[in-house]
Amino acid sequence: MEASDQERLRKEVDEVLHGKGKQPQGPELFKQNDYSNVRHVIGVVSGKGGVGKSLVCGVLAVELARRGARVGVLDADITGPSIPKMLGLSGARARGVDELIVPVRTKGGIEVMSANLVLEHETDPVIWRGPVVAGAIKQFWEDCAWGELDYLLVDMPPGTGDVPLTVFQSLPVDGIVIVSSPQDLVQMVVGKAVNMANMMQVPVLGLVENMAYVECPDCGRKIYPFGPSRLKETAEAFDIEALGQLPIDPRIAESCDRGTFEDELPAGTLSEAVDTVVSVAEFVDALRGGQEG
């Protein structure tokens, strides 16, 4: 390759990585059916796996429902779904009515759609290529009778692959919450999620740090097994809001395994993150009202 060609290619890659080049043209927005009226879509994402993204999604869903909101969860982590078991739906199955899928409702009233709710056995692997997985997301949006929802939370798989791209391009996402953990590589992986959202013109609501500390059961002192918190530092580095921390809590982990998460989640968990989601929704509603007026 000639030096001039190498330089041109380098500039093109640099422009795409920094959002300066031509934005990728995605498909049209997926359409809602006549049995769905979803007012706000909030994505929960992470730059890598193992940071507790589904846990944060579950916290937001439960706390919003406790405040009286009508809430649904679209489990877009097709190959690694964990939302149904966490919310007490292990073994449950979605049903079909008049060519539509009816999500399964939790005891607390949260509507849930997940790949595990349509598999014969919840331990069956989902061995699908990217386009098929993206098609499942479309079906979970267009062919599900979600009913009246104030918030639909989308629990996305880690990284910046096909599913986040599909969700960002094809669902009316009002914003995303990014989940991280206090590790040395956290700024790099958070940066990938932030930059993808910026390229897709999706607002970043802020950052939640999971597994931030362990609280001593005897004296209440906070112990930082992964080193000091990097929440504030990372949020400032990318000019986003710090939305709170979650500790390593065996009781919460056990409640997820038992399916009693809705009942046992301490009240007020991640209140700042929940407040932010509500505030953004109110802002979007006001904006829509002004446009209609």
Image (cartoon, rainbow, N blue to C red):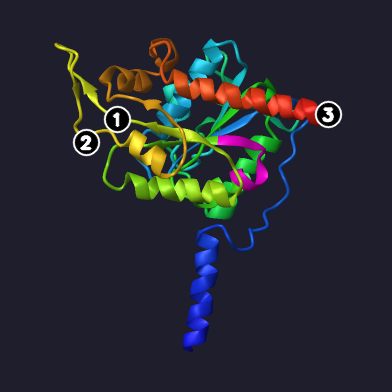
User: 123 or 54, which lies in front?
Assistant: 54
Q: Is residue 279 left or right of residue 30?
A: left
Residue that appears at 35% across and 46% down:
187
Say which mark, if any, is on residue 211: 1
Q: Are marks 1 and 2 in contact (CB under 8 Å)?
A: yes
Residue type at numbered disc 3: Glu
Judge the density around disc 2: few (<14), some (14-19), many (≥20) Cα neighbours within 10 Å: some
Residue type at numbered disc 2: Phe
Say which mark, if any, is on residue 292: 3
Q: Is residue 280 left or right of residue 123?
A: right
Q: Where, quadrant-wise, is the C terminus in this rendering?
A: top right
The residues tagged by marks 1 and 3 sit, at their Cα atoms, a distance apart of: 43 Å
Residue that appears at 60% across and 63% down:
21
Q: 161 above or below 180?
A: below
User: 166 or 130, which lies in front?
Assistant: 166
Q: Residue furthest right?
A: 293
Residue 231 coordinates in the image, percent (x, y) = 34, 34
Residue 4 coordinates in the image, percent (x, y) = 51, 85
Residue 180 coordinates in the image, percent (x, y) = 37, 38
Residue 221, image quadrant: top left
Q: Is residue 174 magenta?
A: yes
Judge the density around disc 1: few (<14), some (14-19), many (≥20) Cα neighbours within 10 Å: some
- Range drawn in magenta: 167-175
Give SS at disc 2.
loop
Q: 56 above or below 220?
A: below
Give SS at disc 3.
helix
Say which mark, if any, is on residue 191: none
User: 63 or 244, which lies in front?
Assistant: 244
Q: Is residue 281 magenta?
A: no
Residue at the spot of label 2: 226
Give SS at disc 1.
loop
The residues tagged by marks 3 and 2 sit, at their Cα atoms, a distance apart of: 49 Å
